[in-house]
Amino acid sequence: MKSLLRRCVNCGEYTLSRDKCPRCGGAVRVPHPPKFSPEDKYQKYRILQKLLMGKLPIRDETKERLLRDLTS
């Protein structure tokens, strides 16, 4: 079952609208995190994305090694 509930990125208002927030006109997104799975097929890509955006607090040597391992 798909989630019907959405949350506005700008004002934080919850809505059932799929397009935009009826209050402020901002973009809406699904507020729930994805389901957890021990066999996570996309873990590699999420770690790579966080690494490239600088959201993982790690040393440069570790970052270079991870990038080399993940991209090969």
Image: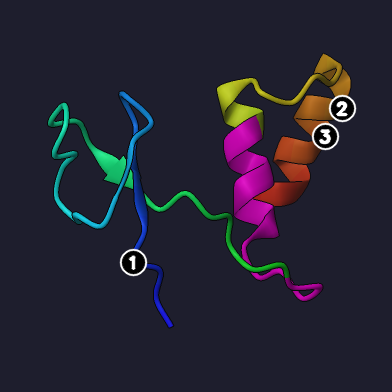
Q: Are marks 2 and 3 in contact (CB under 8 Å)?
A: yes
- Where is 12 relative to 72, above or below? above
Q: Residue at x 73, y 40 (%)?
A: 68
Magenta residues, start to end: 37-50
- In reply to whether residue 22 is colored magenta, the answer given is no
Kindly identify the amino acid type of the residue bearing the numbered disc 1: Leu
Residue 53 in the image: state x and y as whole percent.
56, 25
Q: Are marks 1 and 3 in contact (CB under 8 Å)?
A: no
- The quadrant in which the C terminus is found is bottom right
| Label 1 crowd bin: few (<14), some (14–19), many (20+), radius 10 Å | few
Q: Which residue is mark 1?
A: 4
Kindly identify the amino acid type of the residue bearing the numbered disc 2: Thr
Q: How many callouts does the rendering have? A: 3
Q: Which residue is mark 3?
A: 65
Q: Which mark is residue 50?
A: none
Q: Nearer the viewer, residue 16 or 59?
A: 16
Mark 1 to mark 3 CA distance (whole Å):
41 Å
Kindly identify the amino acid type of the residue bearing the numbered disc 3: Arg
Secondary structure of the residue carrying tag 2 is helix
Q: Residue at x 19, y 39 (%)?
A: 21
Mark 1 to mark 2 CA distance (whole Å):
41 Å
Q: Which residue is mark 2?
A: 62
Secondary structure of the residue carrying tag 1 is loop
User: Which mark is first along the chain, 3 or 1?
Assistant: 1
Q: Is residue 13 left or right of residue 43?
A: left
User: Which mark is first along the chain, 2 or 1?
Assistant: 1
Q: Nearer the viewer, residue 46 or 19?
A: 19
The residue mark sitting in front, 1 or 3, is: 1
Q: Is residue 71 left or right of residue 4?
A: right
**Residue 33 occupies quadrant:** bottom right
